[in-house]
Amino acid sequence: MTTENPGLDRFVEAVAAEVAAVGDDEQAVTQAVAGHLETWLAEGVEIPAPLRAPRDDHYVMYPLYVAPDGAFSIASAVWNVGQKTPVHDHGTWGVIGIVSGRELEQRYVPGESGLTFLGEDHLEPGDVEVCCTSDADVHAVAAASDVPCVGIHVYGADIGTLPRRSFDVETGAVKTFVSTWGVPA
């Protein structure tokens, strides 16, 4: 792959190689992808302005790369000041890294009587975290600073087309949704 962004090109090649090498081993692929994302963030991630622009009405995910076979996708995820996602899952593995702003992640575990709050993390620029695997996949994310939060999100599927679930914190009610891309992939 070649774009006008050599850092993204190197990252895509590294993620593709890891996905091909480890296959369905979520722990191995997320740890490897996290290492590559740390390197890219340290080198200085460059995202074109239109792909890091917040929206007034809700958070947005812009596709930076979607593998032709749907094996993984890389997004620029943007939350404007005060925006928060519903509590949701992903249905696949995921790794996130913060480019700018600050992110609050609140983790939950679903059960028969609703959701149980597990804890929260504050992520700063340069921080990388495995956000989801099959055994830990329910959270809410919010911008936690006075500037928009921009992150690189890497998922083990085309996250812009993947059916996922959102959860009502009070009742545990579940709805299916697709978080479509902010621009065509």
Image: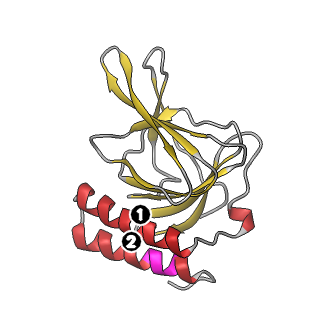
Quadrant position of residue 71: bottom left
Q: Is residue 102 left or right of residue 123?
A: right
Identified at 72% across, 43% down, the residue is 146
Residue identifier under label 1: 72
Q: Sequence order check: which comes first, mark 1 or mark 2?
A: 2
Judging from the image, what secondary structure is the residue with disc 2 in?
helix
**In the rendered image, which residue does mark 2 sit on?**
15
Q: Amino acid at mark 2?
A: Val
24 in magenta: no
Residue 99 coordinates in the image, percent (x, y):
59, 60
Residue 14 placement (x, y as % from top left): 38, 76
User: Residue flagged by tag 1: what amino acid is it?
Assistant: Phe
Range of the magenta residues?
A: 8-12
**Quarter location, residue 56:** top right
**Residue 135 versus residue 34: which sits nearer the camera?**
34
- Say whether marks 1 and 2 touch (CB < 8 Å): yes
Pointer 2: residues within 10 angstroms few (<14), some, or many (20+)? many
User: Of circles 1 and 2, which is in front?
Assistant: 2
Q: Secondary structure at mark 1?
A: loop
